[in-house]
Image: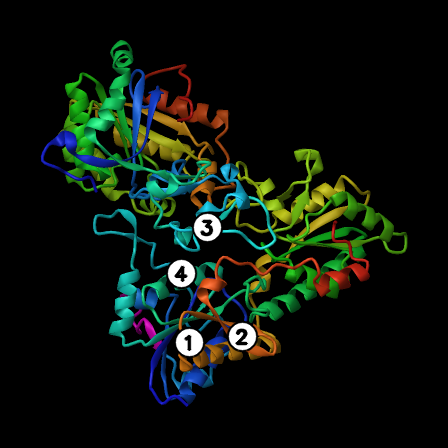
Amino acid sequence: MNTNKKRIAIMVGAGFVPGMNAVIKGAALAAGQLGWEVVGIRDGFEGLLHPKHYPEGGLLPLTPQLIENLDPSTGSVLGQSSRVDPFHVRQINADEMVEEVDQSDELLAKLKAEKIDALISVVGGQGLTILYKLHGKGLNAVCIPRAIEGDVAATLVSFGFNSALSFTIDMLDKARQAAQAARKIAVVEVLGAQAGWLALQAGIAAGADAVLIPEIPCDLQKVAARLKEKMTTRRSYGLVVVAEGAKLVDNAKAGTDKPSTLKASLSPLASGDNSSHVIQRSGHAAETVASRLQLLIAEETFPLVVGLWARGGNPTAVDRQLGLAYGAGAVQALNTGQNGVMVAFVPPAIKFVPLAEAINKVRTVPPDNEFLKTAQSLGICLGN
Amino acid sequence: MSNQSTTPSATTGIVLNIQRYCSHDGPGIRTNVFLKGCSLRCKWCGNPESIRVKPELSYDPKKCKGRECSLCLKDPFPKGAFYFTEGEEGPVKVNWDLTSGCDEALCSLCPTGALEMYGKTMTVDEVLAEVEKDASIYRSSGGGITLSGGECMLQPDFSAALLKGAHERGMNTAVETACNVPWANIEKVLPHVDTMLHDHKLTIPERHKKWTGVGNERILANFKKAYETFPNTEFIARTPLIPGVNADEEHIRAVLAFIRPHKNVIDYELLPYHRFGLGKYEYLGKVYELDDYKTPSDEVVKHLQAIIDEAFGRTGQRAPAAK
């Protein structure tokens, strides 16, 4: 054991993911074993940058008593911030003017003043870039990926994914029952702006007729043909699962096989697949697929959106374990002298990946993936 | 912000764009000079590239040649700022959080012009030289220069020097402002202004804060003080008309009640909300928050315009076209 006593801080980025408290608990327990002191920063970096907003203090000491009774099913004990970017903090200045200021130096100075030796950050894709920049300015940082859609590269499984998957399957089961009763085709949109892991795995588990994912541009003619084959007088319903970032091969519109995202097709002036201008609202993908399918088949279609519902709720047993493991893994990284790394779970091992290698990458479903093969062998149409 | 040097003509400011042959922002044919930096964050903003004070990167993916070029993945471009996703073709992707090191010199290395900078530092003389190209048109049309933004009052020394120089050259001068700045800034600029176009965006302070980021108490106080301190300046009130935000009688009547006691407020114009700025959000890597909002119907615009016309003692006038 490293006997060098440390004082470390934990912060949580934007967006709730089931299992967040398990991560915090895992880090605090592991640090406690080393005799380290652990504090949590409230609401992203807010607790540190603006402690006056918190009468009870912007830093929360993660004492054994607090950790012992931490409820895994509630929201993060540290709260969250919609913005975790200290390089562009929007504020109203003394002249009542709105401005964006760079508070990164102030943040680093405050961490130093609080005698924080290292920071554990639970962040998503953009947060990884921010921590990479802060690390470049001298911050000792270890990141834990928060990727409910399973799309952060370099780690195979993120905490929260299993909870979202279980919930999504549950919702798809209900949608299938509703479609069965109404003799209609349910088109259900699920999380997955960049990667189709949730849609694919949930679609397989729920027995979907078709699964549309961002990685495979979809021809709705083929989906319609498959639905026609499967629908009989004895089975007059259908279930189509659509990841929110699914793409269509829009022959009629473009005159080529160039795919366009469903969201971008509804964003005037956005340039399609590579557009940064993608409307961050759920429901468009399901509506588009349902209405276009309706033109191709006789049975009635209806859109449903699981969307953000999958981000809440209790963590599953898998995610509790993963959360604790990720938290403990981050402390292990610091204890072994790692810095500027992301904790990755590549079964059976916990690994540490340099942040420079973790950013700008998305973990998508590769063409030879076993889940794709399984879907195909089960007769699930992927629209290709 | 603007750099006040020893001679006003050498004063520098950050200019976003110089647009010739404009006809909606003051009398006659005009040249609009858009300055960088804004002290509001209106959710409907049609000029998102004007918000930040400093020059910033713009990226047009439609011009990018993709992997066959890949120049921006190498030195001297910032590491990680540009990248390709494994297995994907198409234009390069941008990690906007890592682009702060980009400047005009770097952008000039992009062979297709996909990378550009919004905004550059210019002297008063440089701007006026450009504006003076249409001096004969200003003389025949009664036009001149209009400073817009962003918020031109955020660069008061530069703006004042520009307008003073324009006056000396015989041009009509106008500014387009929201006046969310300290009074000292306005006091510097307004002595050189013939017409001030000023935005009454929302009347109720809480709603103003919700849609623009700050309350409107100081703004209204500045308007009132400007009307009274500069009686010879012409003021034209304006409202960007957005259904669901301010396209209602209540707002229009409240603005009329505010401006009508002041005789130097000569008009109140409606600017029906448009979505022309949407594409620019993409170039900046930003997301437009008002996507669900529509342009106001002709019926609504006509109805509200009739209220204004009545207040100004006019009848049968058409609503002004979108800015």
Q: Secondary structure at mark 1?
A: loop
Q: Which residue is mark 4?
A: A130
Q: Which residue is mark 1?
A: A338
Q: Secondary structure at mark 2?
A: loop
Which residue occupies the foreground of this view, A145 or A68? A145
Is residue A53 visible in the rendered image? The answer is: no
| Amino acid tagged 3 | Leu
**Residue plotted at (9% across, 35% down):** B6
Q: Which residue is mark 3?
A: B73
Residues tagged 2 and 1 counted as in contact (Cβ below 8 A)? no
Mark 2 crowdedness (10 Å alpha carbons): few <14, some 14-19, many ≥20 = some
Q: Are marks 4 and 2 on the same chain?
A: yes
Q: Earlier in the sequence, mark 1 or mark 4?
A: 4
| Amino acid tagged 4 | Ile
**Percent of width and height locating residue B176:** 28, 30
Above or below, comparing residue A229 to residue A135 in the picture? above
Q: Secondary structure at mark 3?
A: helix
Q: Left or right of B177: which side holds A31? A: right
Q: Left or right of A283: which side holds A136? A: left
- Picture quadrant where residue B198 is located: top left
**Percent of width and height locating residue A291:** 70, 42
Indicate the quadrant containing the C terminus of chain B: top left, top right, bottom left or bottom right.
top left
Give me the C-alpha separation between circle 1 and circle 3.
27 Å
| Amino acid tagged 2 | Ser
Give me the C-alpha separation between circle 4 and circle 3.
19 Å
